[in-house]
Amino acid sequence: MRQLSVRMARWSALHAGRAIAGWFVFVILCLVAGIAAGTNQATTEDFRVGEAGRAEAMATEGGLQRSPTEHVVIRARSGQLDMAAAGSAAHDVTARMRDLPEVKSVAAPVRSEDGKVLRVSVVLNGPELEGKKNVVPLLEQTAEVGASHPGVVVEETGSPAISKGVNDQRGEDLALSERISLPVTVITLLIVFGSVVMAGVPLLLALSSIAAAIGLSMVASHVLPDAGVGMNLILLIGLAVGVDYTLFYLKREREERARAGGRLGPEALVELAAATAGRAIVISGLAVIVSTATLYLATDVIFSSLATGTILVVAVAVASSLTVLPALLVTIGRRTERRAARRAKRGKPARVAKPETGRVSGALLRPARTRPALTLCLSVLVMLGLAAPALGLKLIDPGKDTFSRDIPAMQVYDRLTGSFPELLVTHEVVARSTPERAPEVKQALVDLGRRAQSDPLFAKGAKGAKDTEPEVRTSSDGRISVLELAVPHPAPSSQAIESLVRLRQDHIPATVGRLGGVETGVSGDVARGRDYVAHESDKLPLVIGFLLLMTFLMTVWAFRSVVIGVIGVLLNLLSAGASLGMLVVVFQGTWAQDLLAFDSLGAIASRVPLFLVVILFGLSMDYQVFVVSRIQEARQNGVPAREAVLDGINRSAKVVTSAAIVMVTVFGAFVALHLTEMKQMGFCLAVAVLLDAVIIRLMVLPSVLLLLGERAWWPARPVRSRHAGAPAAGALADVG
């Protein structure tokens, strides 16, 4: 690995112009290829899991699948609704909607029980997920009707309008996160390097890596469909690791420059940095990629999309650090040498970089250095205490009821469901049999509908109307039948969940479930959410098991030490557990709602824990690799085990802390977003990085290694003493 990084750095150093031009040509080609290929968005079929997914597949087979539906709400500005004005507006809406090519059908107006609201339901053409693309003309027509009928308020909501609103809000949120994280990142880099040029290099490479990864992800979506979340993650992870990898490389180059005292040229300095930091970047990047790849085992389109985005942006970031970064450093180094020569001609003394003293890191390391056993015990107890609340973790699949009320369509949705509570939740019971049994199946579904009408958890009628005959839809070939049952409770509520349980366990077995040879299934928003949580829970042991195994194997491969591998796994578990515990404390309760501007779900979004554990293991491996690499390097130089630990951690502490500040800023900016799921992810990642950089790397890890001594490197043999502080022999041999 060292030879590979050195060879790439040597070529880039000798052909700096070509390396820089080649990198930006690569970025442009990636973008052009992505734009030409376009993004292959995931379809409804890609999201199907469990019984709900099976029921949806059966309904689609009979042409009875759920269609995207919008609701136009007509209400009074104040007081009672003028039915004449409302009827005129409803007639106008109906006529306009029927003329749109995006519209499949328009239902007759329905008046609410209190007479204050008139509703017109509009069914769109096409699959359910395409509704958000086709809803714009409908929203425009609704706005025009509202302007033409000033006596009433005309507004629109529905899953397509809400999805569009969420996408628009997500775009605004990402722009906000960039406005927060970029300035802090720039300030941090300026403090670390004291140079605008050197601070601009990490940002330039991170942003170009993100651009290339975006293009590649668009191409990759034709193999693994994009679930609409990959772009967010590319921006989130790309900025964090892109800056971090470049930061580690730059700091090592500056350290070698200070050590050389002007005796080595920029090419040699770059090769020295490549032999050490370059190797660590490759190993770290591979660790993140391997860890993230375990998400594919979840067999879920969302996790596959997240994994693809993360893997691509990390791979590109590693490539940029090994190719264009050495070329940029050599170019900057040559310019620095020319400036130094001009200063010398003018009789001014040359500026010599001074080695960093590490006084702050030395102070932070003092507890581990003086009392490692006590420091280890106290630190682990603190982390376990932070992790304890994770035992009470509750999962929920956040539906549209949990979206921000800053979205106009969500405000209309609340008014709509307040007047028509039967629209809150709909269970779809699907039955499949042979055509000749269609009448028998239909009667059983009618009996099921009547049974549900007598259940207080369900609305009094298949679609909310009181004491009506349940409506059963049957496919043209008579094989598929669908019954819709309304529930006047929001999807995340315990009543809605209990209605699904009762339907599956009691009502269906007592009616259509008694018919031999008839396949049944229940779908709908609640069923989808519950089955999705169950699906993730089933996959969790497999993903975590492979994650632990791959983390262990990667660490053993990198450092040739079984003990270091075990330590790495345990420390990653400790870091991930503590951050998840903090996540539960903050977001599962209500005390932090006003502080962080969110409405507590009483649970954690079901996708968050699994995704976070995988990503946190990868990011923790970043610090593990960089810190332990410095310790291993000192040990290979013949430094005694104790001094090697202190020297390695002390030398890497400032750069790890700087990298952690960048990551915490990038992730912490997501706490300011509207979507609760993104808030939870950003908060947990920021907390994990902070805990890992401070407690794990400056207290727990040095304490463990100091207590173990040479035993930490088993089965490797002790290294004979050489002069402390000299560069690694392998690095010097590579530089030649």
Image (spheres, rainbow, N blue to C red):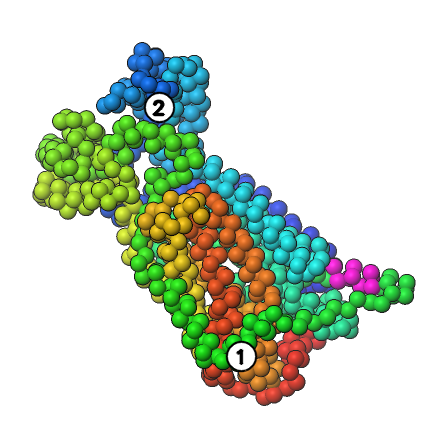
Amino acid at pointer 1: Arg
Q: Residue at x 65, y 61 (%)?
A: 192
Task: Tell me where residue 162 appears, x and y as whole percent.
Answer: 39, 34
Q: Position of residue 714 (x, y in %)?
A: 46, 83
Q: CA distance from mark 1 to mark 2?
A: 69 Å
Q: Is residue 510 above or below residue 101?
A: below
Residue, disc 2: 72
The first of marks 1 and 2 along the sequence is 2
456 to 223, vertically: above or below:
above
State the SS at label 2.
Answer: strand
User: Does residue 696 belong to the magenta stretch?
Assistant: no
State the SS at label 1: helix
User: What secondary structure prevails in the magenta region?
Assistant: helix
Q: Magenta region: which residues? A: 331-340
In the image, taking residue 434 as reference, residue 687 lies left or right, namely right
Q: Report whether 677 appears left or right of 244.
A: left
User: Which residue of the protein is positioned furthest toward the right in this rendering?
Assistant: 346
Q: Is residue 616 left or right of residue 56?
A: right
Quarter of the view holding residue 437: top left
Name the residue carrying label 1: 369
Specify the quadrant of the image occupied by residue 20: bottom right
Q: Residue at x 30, y 56 (%)?
A: 537
Categorize mark 1 by other alpha carbons within 10 Å: few (<14), some (14-19), many (20+): many
Which disc number belongs to residue 680? none
